[in-house]
Image: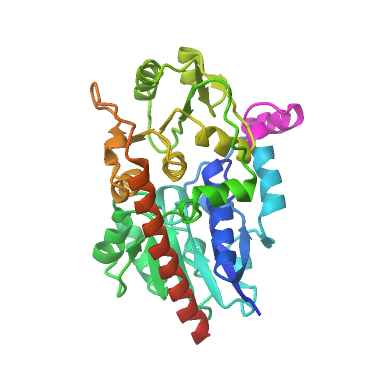
């Protein structure tokens, strides 16, 4: 009989990476022999709004409803992701807030897992202890590639983080800064392990098989731009680098997943595929001549498929991308925003990179499996 585990993560934001890392975690747990239920916790909820999260204005809510009816703008992407969540994720019943989580009985689960994505980020999560699994004290807890995505956490949240994260049987994080927060800032009596994001714990071939991604490339060569700007401003660097890469790779097209008002569309004449499906998103990364991205998951998928890559990285202490690139010995593929006339070197030894990635993947899956077996055997 397969043991049941519950997964607390972020999967409701309109972002390819958040949904894909949730699917990947569910898939890898199934691969290890567990039945995974994703906790359907509402984020953001009233608690987040009361603690500084920007509340949608009345006008914004009306615009969103109109967009939903007309099928335009951001709602196109949201609808695609909603369909994927409903069809591919094993969700629990809805939980509207922390209190509803606390009132439930979690005894059917052998472990509760926290991870991955930025669910310990104090900027966006505001110290929400639900993502630290504060709602249950009786079930063993494990963190899989949980991310702070900051260099330090605010002083007023340190004791809260320490209280709840000290209850974990084992903790793995997604970047080196996270490990240093656990060890130095929180002084927890555990040794954190830096592991791959779940999207990298499935190989490129596994992704191709899971989502039936076509092996037939498009007729024209193209640059793939996946630019996100919520964590830092990648412009105008992204525009200047894309123009250089277009000449360097002799490409006739620039494809972007941004909407039609984005700078790459208006300034470069890029072709927007905003709102494409998840399998199309991965298809275009897989077949790109070169990937230019400011996204962690854009970086991860380019590396997983062995594509030439320029990863735009911030200077604000968020080391998620550079931690990954260093582990694969391809940090030369990164450019820090604000660098004048940066050297663009997207090419690397793919065989060596894939060998390193496979070995790290093997060790990380072993760590997850060993820790799950240990904590579930004690329940």
- Indicate the quadrant where residue 92 lies: bottom right
Q: Position of residue 302 (x, y in %)?
A: 44, 39
Of residues 273 and 237, the one drawn nearer to the viewer in this rendering: 273
- Res 4 seen here: yes
Of residues 311 and 146, the one drawn nearer to the viewer in this rendering: 311
In this rendering, the answer to whether 177 lies above or below 378 is above
Quarter of the N terminus within the rendering: bottom right
Of residues 359 and 262, the one drawn nearer to the viewer in this rendering: 359
Q: Horizontal placement of 242 versus 48: left or right?
A: left
Q: Position of residue 163 (x, y in %)?
A: 38, 71
Query: Which residue range is magenta in the image?
Result: 58-77
Q: Position of residue 141 (x, y in %)?
A: 48, 73
In percent of the image, x 31 and y 35: which residue is there? 333
- Indicate the quadrant where residue 112 lies: bottom right
In this rendering, the answer to whether 32 lies above or below 251 is below
In percent of the image, x 54 and y 29: which residue is there? 257
- Res 12 seen here: no
Q: Is residue 60 magenta?
A: yes
Q: For the view shown, which residue lies furthest in the right direction? A: 69
Of residues 290 and 316, the one drawn nearer to the viewer in this rendering: 290
**What scheme was used to colour the molecule?**
rainbow
Q: Is residue 144 magenta?
A: no
In percent of the image, x 72 and y 51: which residue is there? 87
Q: Position of residue 33 (x, y in %)?
A: 58, 71
Q: Horizontal placement of 351 versus 85: left or right?
A: left
Tally of numbered discs: 0
In terms of secondary structure, what is the magenta stretch mainly? helix
């Amino acid at each position: 009989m397969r043991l049941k585990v519950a997964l607390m993560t972020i999967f409701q934001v309109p972002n390819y990476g958040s949904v894909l890392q949730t699917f990947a975690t569910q898939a890898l747990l199934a691969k290890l022999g567990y039945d995974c239920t994703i906790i359907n916790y509402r984020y953001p909820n009233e608690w987040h709004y009361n603690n500084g999260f920007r509340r949608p204005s009345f006008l914004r809510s009306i615009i969103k409803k109109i967009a939903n009816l007309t099928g335009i703008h951001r709602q196109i992407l949201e609808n695609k992701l909603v369909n994927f969540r409903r069809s591919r994720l094993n969700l629990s019943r809805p939980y509207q807030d922390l209190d509803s989580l606390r009132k439930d009985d979690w005894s059917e689960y052998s472990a509760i897992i926290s991870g991955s994505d930025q669910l310990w980020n104090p900027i966006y999560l505001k110290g929400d202890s639900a993502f630290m699994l504060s709602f249950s004290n009786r079930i063993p807890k494990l963190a899989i590639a949980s991310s702070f995505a900051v260099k330090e956490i605010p002083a007023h949240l340190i004791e809260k983080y320490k209280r709840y994260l000290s209850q974990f049987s084992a903790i793995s994080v997604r970047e080196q800064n996270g490990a240093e927060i656990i060890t130095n800032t929180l002084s927890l009596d555990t040794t954190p392990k830096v592991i791959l994001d779940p999207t990298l714990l499935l190989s490129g071939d596994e992704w191709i098989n899971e989502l039936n991604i076509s092996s037939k490339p498009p007729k024209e060569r193209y640059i793939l731009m996946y630019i996100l700007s919520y964590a830092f401003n990648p412009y105008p660097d992204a525009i200047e680098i894309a123009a250089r890469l277009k000449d360097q790779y002799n490409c006739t097209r620039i494809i972007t997943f941004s909407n039609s008002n984005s700078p790459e569309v208006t300034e470069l004449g890029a072709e927007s595929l905003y709102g494409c499906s998840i399998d199309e998103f991965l298809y275009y990364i897989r077949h790109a001549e070169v990937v230019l991205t400011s996204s962690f998951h854009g970086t991860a998928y380019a590396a997983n498929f062995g594509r030439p890559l320029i990863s735009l990285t911030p200077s604000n202490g968020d080391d998620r991308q550079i931690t990954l690139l260093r582990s694969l010995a391809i940090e030369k593929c990164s450019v820090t925003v604000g660098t004048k006339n940066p050297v663009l070197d997207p090419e690397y030894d793919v065989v060596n990179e894939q060998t390193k990635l496979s070995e790290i993947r093997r060790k990380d899956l072993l760590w997850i499996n060993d820790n799950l077996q240990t904590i579930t055997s004690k329940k």
